Structure formats: C-alpha cells, structure tokens
Image (cartoon, helix red, strand yellow):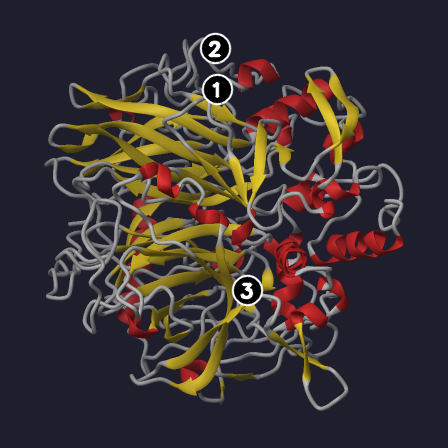
Amino acid sequence: MKGNRHPTNDLTINSSGNESIRDVIDRTGIDRRRFLGAGLQASIAVALAGVYTGATLRSAAAAPLAPSANGFGGIGFDSIAAKLAPVANSVDVPLGYKAELLVAWGDPIVAGGPAWLPDASQSAADQEKQYGMHNDGMHYFPFATRTGPSNERGLLCVNNEYTHEEILFTDGQVGAGYTIAKCRKSQAAHGVSILEVRKTNGKWGVVRTSSLGRRITSNTPMRISGPAAGHALLQSKKYAIAPTGSAQIGVNNGFEANGTINNCAHGYTPWGTYLTCEENWNGNFGATGAIGSPNTGSAALDAVVVNQQTRYGVTAGGFGYRWHTVDPRLDVSTNPLETNLFGWVVEIDPFDPASKPVKRTALGRFKHESAQVALSYDAQGIANRIAYYQGDDERNEYIYKFVATQAFNPRNRAANRELLDSGILYVAKFLSTPGASTGSFRGEWIALVPDTTSVIANGQGGFFKLRELPQFAGASDTEVQALILIKTRQAADAVGATMMDRPEWAALRTYTDGYGYNYSGGGYGYDATHPLEVYCTLTNNNRRGGGGSTNATSVNNPNGTSAAGGARPPVDVANPRPDNDYGHIIRWREDGNYVTATGFEWDLFALCGDTATTKTLGATYQTANLVDGVAGIGPVYQGNIVDAPAGSADLGAPDGLWFDQFGRLWIQTDQAGNATGDFANIGANCMACADPNTKEIRRFLTSPNNCEVTGVVNTPDGKSMFVGIQHPGEDSVAANPTQFSNWPQSQFGKNSAGEDLVAGQAQGANIRPRSSVLVITRDDGGVIGA
C-alpha cells in the first residue's frame, strides 16, 4: 500500500502496461472515452443527502455480462468514466447505485468515545475509543440469526494501516515539538478498529455503545505463538507502557509482544476470527544512535540483527515517524530485537473483547499484505484441509502459502484455536515450463523447512540444505525452523524463489453454483471447470529489467544479504515487462485442486496499462520483454485489459483484490491518485469488476483526490457493500490540511445513519480529510454488481 509514511519503493507515481494484444487500437473508442470523461468532470456537483452517483453520463454503452455456466454471476453495470484531472473530491458509482459514508476517522466506536474534533485536538485516550486512521483491509462478521447469518447486523473489522502526522495533530510535526503525547496518539490511531454496524429502518449505522466495539493499537498486549515463539531473537527489552512514557522493566520471554503496526490487508478464518497482516512495520522504527551496531552481548546475535535490519529495510529515520525519539521501545539503536516482534499475521477474536490477539509465527515473517484462506480435500481424501496464500509487499519479494497440519473442524470451534500454529510454509517458484492449457506455465511450492535444498553450492558437487547454512544453523530442528520463520525472506532467497513485482492481495475464486469455498457457505468439491484458483495483484516494479545508471540487472543474493527492494531483476515469464509501472495480476490453479499440492499451473490474468499512452521505455532498461512467454521488443505500457470499447476500463497499480460470493472479481488500485503524469488517461484510483472467464473488466467506482481505494466486503446476501477510501488529500501540510482534499465533508453532510458527519458543519465545509468506509447499495435493493 502507498502512503506518505511508506518507503519510496512503495510509491507508485507511474503506471505502465505491456503491449496490447490488439493489433489495432480503436481510436474512436478512446476519443469517446476522453470526451465523456471530460464532460463528466465538467458536470460534477454535490448531490443532496450526501449521495453522488457519477455515472448519470455513461462512458460506454455495453450489454450486461450474463452469468455463465461455471459459476460467474455476471456484471450488470456499464463502466463509468475515468476521473481525470483535476480530480473532483467525490466518490462516483454507476447509475442506480448509492454511496453513503458509514464511518470516518475519529468517529466514536467504543462506549464513552467522544466525537471527532475538526481541529484534530483529541487526545490519545480519545483516539483509543475512536475509529482509527487510514483504513485498509476489512471483513464483515455477521451476527447469527435463526434463519442464518444476518444481512443487517454484524461486526466490521477494519485495519488502520498508518497515520498522516500532518493532519493527525493540530500542528502536525512542526518544529521540535514532538512529544510522548503525540507519539501515543499516533500509536493509538494505528492497528485495528472493531465496530458493530446495524441496519435500522433501511439505514446502516455504527452502534456506538456496543460492548463489542474495540480498538487494537500499537501498544495492545499480545501473545506470540507457533514455532518461533520463545526464540532468543524475540526476547527484546520489556517496557511498561504508560501515557507519559515507556520504562524498561526487564526482558521479554519471546512469548509476548505489545501492539501491531502498519496493518495492511487482512484475512479471516472459517472459525470466525480476523487476521490482520503487518506490512511496512519497519518504517515505524528509527534510531537515536548508531544503527548496525546492536551490542546485544553476542557477536553472533549482533550479526543476525544487522542482517535483519538490511534485508527488511530498517533504517535510522524510518518513514518519518518520530516514535523512536520519545519511546525507547521503538529505538533500534538501543532495543534492536523489537523489530523481530513485528512482520507477523495476527489473529483476533472479534466477538470476545477480552481476548488477547495472537501473533502466529508459523505463517512466516515478512511484509504481509493479506492472508487468503482456501479449503479443499487432500490427495488422501481428507476434507477441510486449510491453506493461506500470502504476498510480501515489496519490490522483488515473494508469494507464500501456509498449509496447516491439521484439518479444520467445522463442528468444534475450540479445536481450531491453535490450528495456525503448526504446518508448512511454502514459497512459490514460477517456472517457464509450458502448462497443459494455452498460455499457461508450471510452478512449484518450495517448503521452507530444515531439509529443503538451497541453491547455494556446497563445494562438493551438491547444494547446502537450509539447516546447513549459517543463517539457519541451530542445535535442533525446532531452532532451525524458528530461524527460518523469523528470517523468512532469507530462506526464500536461499531456495531460489521467484522475485515478484510487489505481491499484494491474494483472492480465491468463488463460484455461485456451490463450488469453491467462500464465506457464505458452499462446499469445496473443485473440478476441471471449477478449479481451486487463486489470484494475486503485482502492483508495480520500476526496477524490473534495470533502470539504474545502466541497463544492468541483478537479483536477490541467495545468502540473504540483499537490501530490501534493492535488486534490479531481469524480466521473466511471470514478470514479463521491464519498468513495470502499471503492474499485473497473476493466477494459479493447484494440482488436483488440493491446497496441499506442491505443484500448480499459472497464467497472467491481466497486464494493466494505458491504451492511449505514448510513453516509451527508458534507455537504462533491457529492451526485451517476455509478454505471452516469448521474447519481443516493443511497447510495454499499453496493457492487455479486455474492455469495450478499448481503453474504457484501463487501470494501473492493482492492489486490493476480492471475489464476492457470486464469482465476480473486484480490483482496487493504488497509484498517486491525482490523475497526472503517467495516469493522465487512467485518472484517479478506482475499483473495477472483472469476469474471470473472459477477463473483461468494467470500472465501478472512482475516488476523491490523492487517495487510495482499499478494502471491500459485502453482506452475505450481497446487497450491501463496504468499501474503504484511504488517505484522501495525501501529502497536505500541517499549515494547510485541506491543501488537496476536504473529503468526505466535500461530498457528505450526513452519514448513512442520517447523523451529521461533523456536528455544526455543513456539507462542503473546509474540514481536514478523513479516511472512511462507505456503504454502497442499489436503488432497487438488488445484489451489488449483478
């Protein structure tokens, strides 16, 4: 995910697509798109009651996509126009749909929580009872009723990924006035928000006095479980955390931690718990002294810590947060092992506010983007085998799969409590060997276990096993496995996994006719026409194919010493374009339709891009590409998105990805958001919908200025959809918080429950921007997207 507290290698200021699969671009269609897009921008107005449907003028006349025989529920709306510069501060949806604001940063969600103050003067204690900042992944947990899961009452669990300090505080981070009070408020705005939502008399609202309302922050006590729990590398200094400061009180035992940070996308479990994924956690740390000289008292441990700092991108300045200047717990120069307590998947029981969140080490440690669940039979006929697919969101990182040792027990919730503590973590290798179907290739899952053979030669005609490499050497298999999980990136380096172009969200294909696994039910009797199929967004990588001072390329060092995001890998069949500014979407089908399979078949679902671009490849990149699996030379930025007319649904920097229970694939984007530069034709960020059979894409939603569209889920009946808008007005300064946006106040005077968005402030008031969750419905009460 992008943001002003994220590293430069996550910024997506360009977009690029590969050469179009069409030999002739329909210029008439493109001209039509530009004309209608401009007309829409000229006609933008704020609608009454805070509702704006921006597709009253359609960008393309297209017939609905009919449901198909193999589980696709169809698409019943036309693409709306791209939102071109200057980007209006509104959310636009198709004709016949309504977007309303459900909750915004600072709204009270815990009993006793105060209302948000427009000058951002609320305290850390206030923020601990209010909805957090910069929402990301989310999931809806319906309440149970006698007739099934509720479509009108549930818990919405939402990640709060990071904070924009310049608008979080009244005076930002101006001057030297950064205090522990500011630090605690920032830490309180991170984490997870759990809020009860309810539909009453046709209106969705937040139950602000709910006993289930809860905030999980950067300081919430947690436990650590799984194979790495208790290891010496997790035994950081222990602090008593108070509003006035952090005081050291000993050493952690490796089984406990405080807080979760940089919570990006998410997952859920079939037994009803929420998974929040720690992504760019490294940027919340910093150093007041020398970094790289940890002085733990052990030379061997010092070396490990230094390597971890490099491979995971820990730096003295972090992403510009100042936590480490007032909170010694986050100072890597004095507490270097604290970083090892982050980078995990955290399991939370949303229906038990007294429960302690658990960091599940068996799923590996890296910059987790999401955790997509899948269930199937295995080759022995055992049902309910469970796997989680995960991306490591940084340039040149990897795609992973965790397979639990034990099967899920649908009849005994207690039996699943520690299911995620035991299993095998795999990393993907995408091969160039042709697959069985046209345009497909083979791939393999490499187990990250002690006896796996690395690609590092042993000097005797063979190769070292992971257990034989110094970075994983231990006195027992238990210790070796713990080291592999703590240093997951280095283990993936060592086994030669495929370096990918920023793997982000994974999504499991669902089917409407009872095939596949999804939240609302169904079996998992996959077959040839209903395969166990997983998709993953690869957002971008401007280092692919060179791009330095020369067109030289490089790869991650197998010994695990490469700097985070530092390599410049050559193109390969899974990442076929140099300077991959626009990104792509990859998908794979597990052999035998088993989550336990160690082989798979893959292809590229979409190469994103701009049909109308005239951008040419820079001289410092390798000129060849591997689009369609064969070497070629030519344009690499146009993409091969299937739409009608050509260019009507162009998008770049795909990020959020989700299948609804009707087989529709929803795609959310994360680029600069102001529709300038390489995004002049594509416009602002958007959410689109795709047919997984034909690959046709239609644009469903466009966003306000300088924001990201991220997080999507719906109710079990599919008639209410929750969508997140993150960091509107990004990059504004403390002296002018509305420099780029005053959304949502620009569009909404009241929220979806009919309450004033800000007491005493009218719609359109010049109030600082707030990340928010929308609720989208159809005017006719139908299923979203149908």
Alpha carbons under labels 3 and 2: distance apart: 43 Å
- Mark 2 or mark 1, which has the lower sequence index? 2
Left/right placement of residue 67 relative to residue 217 reads left
| Tag 3: amino acid | Tyr
Question: Hey, which residue is sitting farthest front in the picture?
Answer: 476
- Mark 1 or mark 3, which has the lower sequence index? 1
**Residue 44 shows in the view:** no
Measured along the vertical axis of the image, is residue 642 above or below residue 94? below
Labelled pair 2, 1 in contact (Cβ < 8 Å): yes
What residue is shown at x 63% (from left), y 19% (from top)?
170
Q: Which residue is mark 2?
A: 114
Residue 398 is labelled as 3
Q: Crowdedness of circle 3 by 10 Å Cα count: few (<14), some, many (20+)?
A: many
Residue 130 is labelled as 1
Residue 497 is labelled as none
Labelled pair 1, 3 in contact (Cβ < 8 Å): no
